[in-house]
Image: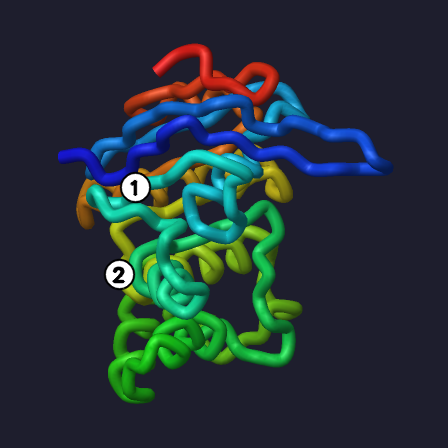
């Protein structure tokens, strides 16, 4: 079943009076349950494309359809709700709040989404246990290793039971062994929870583990 479709997606910026075209007409379909790698050189538009898929940014023209619903006809409030409930984001840098514990960081999206404190805590504890962090619930990010921090960020992305996880270079700040552990967790959630996974990566080994690969060149997808 098709989950996401883009039609004629363009994105450009003006810098110093010069128009810079980042995305140049992307038409792609992503099926529910797929694991997709987006690969390409730096500066070809991979992160911009991912941000538009997750409604963190708007295209200059074109549309993203999520289950046939056009995203960019929604109000900003509805887009914020969509991001909170339907999309999980994982970035190269974990963006955990340093003053909060691992447990509190994971609970936060659920609390923002209106889930009760008790239910948010129960969900967060369960997920942190699933990734082997049951003894680190009350540790702050500064007391965790890089791999532990990224696992916390991963389960934070899962706490609202999203249908898709968008991950932008999620292993870029980790050593290769720890990075592969994070990818294996992502693929485990893809298999076991039927969560669609879209990963921007420079790592060919990671790309080879995904069920599909989209190659970006100069703002366009040239395969897939």
Q: Which residue was labeled with disc 1?
A: 65
| Of residues 212 and 67, the one drawn nearer to the viewer in this rendering | 67
Q: Are marks 1 and 2 in contact (CB under 8 Å)?
A: no
For residue 118, the mark is none
| Of residues 120 and 77, the one drawn nearer to the viewer in this rendering | 77
Q: Residue at x 40, y 61 (%)?
A: 79
Q: Is residue 44 above or below residue 2?
A: above
**Side (left or right) of 34 relative to 15:** left
Q: Position of residue 19 (x, y in %)?
A: 73, 30
Q: Position of residue 137 (x, y in %)?
A: 44, 75
| Of residues 117 and 26, the one drawn nearer to the viewer in this rendering | 26
Way the structure is coloured: rainbow
Which mark lies nearer to you, 1 or 2? 1
Q: Which residue was labeled with disc 2?
A: 161
Q: Position of residue 86 (x, y in %)?
A: 30, 57
Q: Looking at this view, name the residue that lies furthest to the left.
A: 1
Q: Quadrant of residue 3?
A: top left
Let me know if residue 178 appears in the view.
Answer: no
Q: Residue at x 40, y 63 (%)?
A: 75
Q: Looking at this view, name the residue that lies furthest to the right.
A: 16
Q: Quadrant of residue 144?
A: bottom right
- Position of the C terminus, as image quadrant, is top left
| Of residues 221 and 208, the one drawn nearer to the viewer in this rendering | 221
Q: Residue at x 71, y 29 (%)?
A: 20
Q: Position of residue 220 (x, y in %)?
A: 51, 18
Let me know if residue 1 appears in the view.
Answer: yes
Q: Is residue 12 above or below residue 100?
A: above
> What's the distance in space between the residues labelled 1 and 2, CA to CA?
20 Å
Mark 1 residue crowding within 10 angstroms, few (<14) / some (14–19) / many (20+): some
């Amino acid at each position: 079943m098709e989950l996401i479709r883009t039609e004629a997606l363009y994105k450009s910026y003006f810098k110093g009076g010069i128009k810079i075209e980042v995305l140049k007409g992307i038409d792609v379909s992503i099926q529910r349950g797929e694991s997709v790698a987006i690969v390409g050189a730096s500066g070809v538009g991979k992160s911009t494309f991912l941000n538009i898929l997750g409604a963190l940014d708007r295209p200059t023209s074109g549309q993203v359809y999520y289950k046939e619903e056009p995203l960019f006809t929604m109000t900003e409030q509805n887009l914020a709700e969509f991001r909170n409930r339907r999309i999980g984001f994982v970035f190269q840098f974990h963006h955990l709040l340093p003053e909060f514990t691992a447990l509190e960081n994971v609970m936060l999206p659920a609390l923002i989404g209106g889930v009760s404190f008790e239910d948010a805590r129960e969900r967060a504890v369960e997920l942190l246990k699933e990734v082997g962090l049951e003894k680190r619930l009350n540790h702050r990010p500064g007391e965790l290793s890089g791999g532990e921090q990224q696992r916390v960020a991963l389960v934070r992305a899962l706490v609202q039971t999203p249908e898709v996880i968008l991950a932008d270079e999620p292993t870029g700040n980790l050593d290769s062994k720890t990075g592969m552990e994070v990818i294996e967790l992502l693929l485990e959630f893809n298999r076991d929870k039927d969560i669609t996974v879209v990963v921007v990566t420079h790592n060919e080994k990671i790309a080879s583990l995904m069920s599909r690969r989209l190659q970006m060149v100069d703002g366009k997808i040239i395969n897939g």
